[in-house]
Image (tube, rainbow, N blue to C red):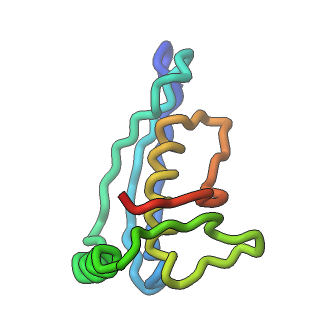
């Protein structure tokens, strides 16, 4: 507890590449939840020990696949009601995780437990 400021936590984490379970890095983080004003996102300071996997090649393949579609990408309900994500939608699902992670960080408190449930609709812009 930091008087008049908030609650601070020190975390030791292991980050795992969701697509490559053998690729992990250690991380430390300090998270400060501010007292009183629930409209302030927690402050997060972190360090990564080692290097995250370079995804440039996979990112370019995904970009070129989306760019070359004859029709704009439009999809709904990912995952479906049975939890299935079509393989061609997996990159979109991963992008949604990133977006939801940002929303969660910006709106989280010590007592919230948000997670991505489903992409209701995605449209290529």
Residue found at the far front of this picture: 70
State left or right for residue 55 relative to residue 88: left
Residue found at the far right of this picture: 82
**Near-viewer residue (82 or 115):** 82
Residue at image point 44% right, 84% down: 20
Residue at image point 66% right, 58% down: 117
Q: Position of residue 63 (x, y in %)?
A: 29, 74
Q: Position of residue 59 (x, y in %)?
A: 29, 75
Q: Position of residue 100 (x, y in %)?
A: 51, 51
Q: Is residue 60 visible?
A: yes
Q: Position of residue 40 (x, y in %)?
A: 46, 25
Above or below for 121 versus 4? below
Q: Is residue 53 visible?
A: no
State left or right for residue 4 relative to residue 112: left
Residue at image point 34% right, 43% down: 45
Total marks drawn?
0
Residue at image point 24% right, 82% down: 57
Query: Which quarter of the picture shows residue 51?
Result: bottom left
Query: Which quarter of the picture shows residue 124?
Result: bottom left
Rendered-image quadrant of the C terminus: bottom left
**Near-viewer residue (78 or 56):** 78
């Amino acid at each position: 507890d930091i008087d008049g400021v908030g609650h601070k936590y020190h975390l030791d984490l292991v980050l795992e590449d969701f697509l490559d379970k053998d690729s992990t890095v250690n991380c430390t983080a300090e998270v400060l939840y501010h007292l009183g004003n629930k409209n302030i996102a927690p402050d997060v300071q972190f360090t990564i020990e080692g290097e995250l996997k370079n995804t440039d090649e996979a990112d370019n393949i995904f970009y070129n696949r989306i760019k070359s579609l004859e029709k704009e990408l439009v999809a709904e309900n990912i995952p479906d009601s049975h939890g299935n994500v079509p393989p061609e939608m997996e990159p979109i699902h991963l992008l949604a995780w990133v977006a939801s992670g940002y929303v969660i960080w910006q709106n989280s408190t010590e007592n919230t437990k948000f997670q991505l449930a489903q992409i209701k609709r995605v449209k290529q812009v």
